[in-house]
Image (cartoon, coloured by chain):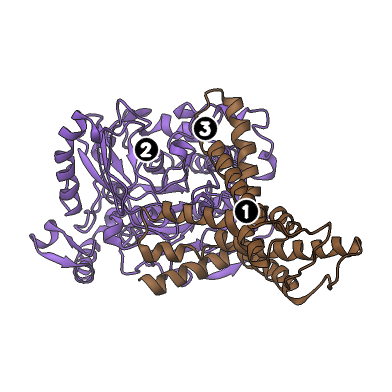
Chain colours: A brown, B purple
C-alpha cells in the first residue's frame, strides 16, 4: 500500500494523538467493555435477560474482533494516519485478543507449546482476515477520494489486491478446506514433529 | 507415565512399557493355549451384545428423569437388567476410553492416551479372547483409534467400520469398510445403517454363541438427527434446560471451537437430544430382533457410553475434564438368564475397564492377569456385592485442546484432582456438592482430607488397587 500524502478537506493529517492514540484507546475500550459484558453475563439471575445479553454481546464481540479493521482502517485513513499506523491500529484488537488467549493457555501449555499455539487457525484467520479487510478498505478509501475528484493514485494496486487474495486463501485453508480439518491435522502433525 | 508398576504381574519389578508388552505377549500365548479347551464351554455360554454410544451422558435418558428425552428402549433395558448409577470412564475421551473397553486396561497401559496416539495392535481385546474360546465375533461401527486406516484386528469374524473424518465418520452417507472393502452408503443414516448390519449378524444361523461389539457414531457432534426427528422438541424453551452458568457461546469461546461445536449451545443441545432418540429407536430394533429369535434370555446386552459430555456446566463444552458430567457414563447390563432381580439400580462404582473382565467372566473364561478392571458378575448376582473404594482418573494432554494433563482420584464421596501446568489442584465433595462448585482445598476440611487423597492418588498411579 503506497503512502499517500494528500492534504485536503477529505484527508486532513491530524496530530499523532488524534489520528492514532485516541482511536486505539477507543478500540481497546470497546473491546474491554464487550469482553466483560459477555464473560460476566452468565452471572445474571434472570435466564431470559442473561440469554439475550450473552447472545448479543457474544456476537458483537466476535464481529468486533474479526471485522473491526473494516472500520478502523478507513477512519485512520481519513484522519491522515500513516500506513504503519493504520496497520497497527487495524491489528490492535486481534493482537490483544491473541495475547490474552496465549496467557490463558500458558496455564497448561509449555512456553514452546504456547508459542506454537499462535499458529492455530482461529488466530491466523483473524490476522489474515484483517489484512484482507485492510486491502479492501484501502481500495475503498481511494475510490472515495477518486469519486470526490481528489484521488491522485490508482484504486487497484498489487499490494491491497494481494492482501485480499491472501485473506481468501487463508479463509479457504483454515475454514473451507475439509471444513478446517485438513489444516487442523497439518497443524497437529507439525506439533508432533516439534514436541514429541 | 514413562514407567509403570504392575505388582500382580512382576512381583514388584519396575517395567518399561515395551518390556511390559513383551511380557503380555508371552503370557497371552500361554493364556490362549490354556483357553483352547474352553471352546466346548463356549457352546453353552451366553451371546453377548455390547452397544457403545459416543458422548452419551449418563443422565440423557428418560429412566434418569431427563426433562425432555424419551428413551423407551434404554428404559426397557434398565428395567429388565441392572442399571449402574455410578459408572465412570478412566479417561473421558473417545479413543482412550474405547481402547479401555476393549482391553480392560487403563490408557497408560494400552497406550492410546488421546485421540492422536496410535492403537498398538499387540493389545489383546476381549473379542480376541472370546474368539479363541469359540465365539462368533463381530465389530460393527466406530473404531476411531489413530493409525493408518483400520487395524488388522484379531479375533473378529466381521469388521465393519469407517475411517472418514479421521475415523469420526459421518451421520449421512458414511462410507464403510465392510470386511476390508470400502463401500459407499448413499442415502443411509449411520445409526440405522450400523444397526442393520448388527441385526443381520445376530440373525445369522450359527452353532456358536456370538459376541457383537456395536459401536455407534451417535451421539457425537455434529449431533445430526435423521430427517424425521429434525423438528422434535421445536417447542421446547431450551434456555430453561441448560445450566445456569452456561451461555449460548460456550461452544465457541476459550478453546471451545476445537470441540467442533461452532454455533449456539441450545441449537446443538436440542440436536443432541434428537440424536439420542434416534439411537434409542435403533436399540429398540435390536431388542425386538433378539425377542423374535427367542434368544433374549441367554443374551447379555450391555449398553454404555464412551464418556460424558459438558453442556455448559462449569462453562465447558466437550469432555476431558475430571468433573462428573464428563466422567460419568450410562451403563446398563441385561442378562435375564443370570439377573434374578431385574430393574435394580446398582450403587457400586464401576469403570469402563470392567467391561472386558465382566464379559469373559460371564462367558466362563478365566480373566487374564493383564486386565486391570474387575468383573461385575458379583454385582449382577447380588446388590450387596463389594464395590471399589477408589479409582484413578487420567487425562493426557492433547494439543491444542485447552485442557491440562489431569490425574485424579475419585472415591465414593470425593474427587481430588491434580493438573499439569500452573493450574491448582481441586477437591470436591461429590455428595454434598454434586455440581462441584466449591473447591474444598482451602477449607479446614479440605486441608485435612488432602494428604489421604493425595496418597491414594499416588498409590493408584503406581498400580495399587483399592477394590
Say which element carries label 1: helix
Residue B249 at least partly seen? no
Residue ID for mark 1: A17
B134 or B331: nearer the viewer: B331
Q: Is residue B181 above or below residue B412?
A: below
- Specify whether A143 is left or right of B58: right
Q: Is residue B311 above or below residue B209?
A: above
Do tags 2 and 1 sit on the same chain?
A: no
Q: Nearer the viewer, mark 2 or mark 1?
A: 1
Number of other residues with Cα within 10 Å of mark 3, as a class: few under 14, some 14 to 19, many 20 or more: many
| CA distance separating discs 3 and 2 | 21 Å
For the N terminus of chain A, give its image quadrant.
bottom right
Say which element carries label 3: helix
Q: Position of residue B66 (x, y in %)?
A: 50, 28
Q: Position of residue B467 (x, y in %)?
A: 18, 42
State the residue at coordinates (40%, 64%): A113
Say which element carries label 2: helix
State the residue at coordinates (31%, 54%): B421
For the C terminus of chain A, give its image quadrant.
bottom left
Chain designation of label 3: A
Chain designation of label 1: A
Residue ID for mark 2: B324
- Specify whether A90 is left or right of B301: right
Q: Position of residue B341 (x, y in %)?
A: 32, 27
Which mark identifies residue B112? none
Amino acid at each position: 500500500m503506497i503512502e499517500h500524502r494528500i492534504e485536503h478537506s477529505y484527508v486532513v493529517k491530524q496530530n499523532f494523538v488524534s489520528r492514532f492514540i485516541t482511536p486505539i484507546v477507543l478500540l481497546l475500550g470497546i473491546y474491554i467493555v464487550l469482553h466483560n459484558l459477555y464473560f460476566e453475563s452468565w452471572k445474571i439471575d434472570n435466564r431470559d435477560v442473561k440469554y439475550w445479553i450473552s447472545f448479543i454481546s457474544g456476537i458483537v464481540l466476535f464481529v468486533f474482533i474479526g471485522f473491526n479493521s473494516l472500520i478502523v482502517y478507513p477512519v485512520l485513513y481519513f484522519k491522515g494516519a500513516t500506513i504503519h499506523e493504520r496497520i497497527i491500529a487495524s491489528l490492535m484488537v486481534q493482537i490483544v485478543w491473541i495475547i490474552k488467549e496465549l496467557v490463558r493457555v500458558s496455564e497448561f501449555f509449555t512456553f514452546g507449546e504456547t508459542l506454537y499455539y499462535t499458529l492455530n487457525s482461529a488466530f491466523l484467520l483473524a490476522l489474515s482476515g484483517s489484512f484482507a479487510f485492510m486491502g479492501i478498505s484501502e481500495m475503498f478509501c481511494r475510490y472515495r477520494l477518486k469519486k470526490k475528484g481528489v484521488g491522485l493514485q490508482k484504486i487497484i494496486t498489487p499490494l491491497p489486491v494481494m492482501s485480499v487474495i491472501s485473506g481468501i486463501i487463508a479463509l479457504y485453508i483454515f475454514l473451507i478446506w475439509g471444513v478446517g480439518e485438513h489444516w487442523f491435522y497439518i497443524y497437529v502433525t507439525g506439533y508432533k514433529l516439534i514436541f514429541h | 507415565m514413562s514407567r509403570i508398576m504392575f505388582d500382580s504381574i512382576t512381583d514388584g519389578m519396575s517395567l518399561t512399557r515395551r518390556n511390559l508388552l513383551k511380557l503380555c505377549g508371552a503370557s497371552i500365548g500361554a493364556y490362549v493355549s490354556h483357553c483352547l479347551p474352553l471352546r466346548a464351554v463356549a457352546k453353552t455360554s451366553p451371546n453377548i451384545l455390547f452397544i457403545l454410544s459416543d458422548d452419551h451422558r449418563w443422565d440423557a435418558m428418560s429412566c434418569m428423569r431427563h426433562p425432555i428425552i424419551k428413551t423407551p428402549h434404554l428404559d426397557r433395558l434398565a428395567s429388565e437388567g441392572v442399571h449402574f448409577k455410578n459408572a465412570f470412564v478412566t479417561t473421558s475421551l473417545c479413543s482412550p476410553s474405547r481402547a479401555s473397553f476393549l482391553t480392560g486396561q487403563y490408557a497408560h497401559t494400552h497406550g492410546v492416551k488421546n485421540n492422536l496416539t496410535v492403537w498398538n495392535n499387540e493389545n489383546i481385546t476381549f473379542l480376541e479372547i472370546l474368539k479363541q474360546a469359540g465365539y462368533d465375533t463381530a465389530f460393527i461401527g466406530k473404531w476411531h483409534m489413530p493409525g493408518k486406516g483400520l487395524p488388522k484386528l484379531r479375533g473378529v469374524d466381521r469388521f465393519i467400520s469407517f475411517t472418514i473424518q479421521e475415523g469420526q465418520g459421518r451421520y449421512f452417507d458414511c462410507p464403510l469398510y465392510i470386511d476390508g472393502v470400502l463401500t459407499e452408503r448413499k442415502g443411509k443414516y449411520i445409526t440405522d445403517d450400523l444397526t442393520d448390519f448388527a441385526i443381520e449378524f445376530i440373525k445369522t444361523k450359527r452353532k456358536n454363541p456370538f459376541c457383537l461389539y456395536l459401536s455407534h457414531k451417535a451421539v457425537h457432534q455434529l449431533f445430526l438427527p435423521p430427517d424425521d426427528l429434525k423438528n422434535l422438541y421445536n417447542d421446547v424453551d431450551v434456555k430453561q434446560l441448560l445450566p445456569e452458568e452456561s451461555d449460548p457461546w460456550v461452544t465457541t469461546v476459550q478453546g471451545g471451537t476445537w470441540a467442533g461445536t461452532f454455533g449456539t449451545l441450545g441449537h446443538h443441545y436440542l440436536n443432541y437430544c434428537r440424536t439420542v432418540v434416534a439411537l434409542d429407536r435403533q436399540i429398540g430394533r435390536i431388542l425386538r430382533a433378539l425377542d423374535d429369535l427367542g434368544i433374549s434370555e441367554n443374551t447379555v446386552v450391555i449398553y454404555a457410553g464412551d464418556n460424558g459430555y459438558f453442556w455448559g456446566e462449569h462453562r465447558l463444552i466437550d469432555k476431558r475434564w475430571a468433573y462428573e458430567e464428563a466422567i460419568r457414563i450410562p451403563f446398563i447390563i441385561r442378562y435375564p438368564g443370570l439377573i434374578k432381580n431385574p430393574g435394580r439400580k446398582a450403587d457400586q462404582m464401576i469403570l469402563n475397564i470392567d467391561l472386558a473382565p465382566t464379559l469373559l467372566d460371564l462367558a466362563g473364561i478365566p480373566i487374564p492377569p493383564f486386565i486391570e478392571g474387575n468383573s461385575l458378575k458379583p454385582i449382577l448376582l447380588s446388590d450387596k456385592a463389594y464395590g471399589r473404594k477408589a479409582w484413578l482418573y487420567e487425562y493426557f494432554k492433547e494439543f491444542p485442546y485447552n485442557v491440562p494433563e489431569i490425574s485424579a482420584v475419585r472415591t465414593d464421596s470425593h474427587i481430588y484432582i491434580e493438573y499439569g501446568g500452573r493450574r491448582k489442584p481441586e477437591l470436591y465433595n461429590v455428595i454434598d456438592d454434586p455440581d462441584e462448585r466449591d473447591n474444598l482445598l482451602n477449607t479446614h476440611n479440605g486441608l485435612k482430607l488432602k494428604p489421604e487423597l493425595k496418597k491414594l492418588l499416588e498409590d493408584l498411579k503406581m498400580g495399587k488397587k483399592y477394590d
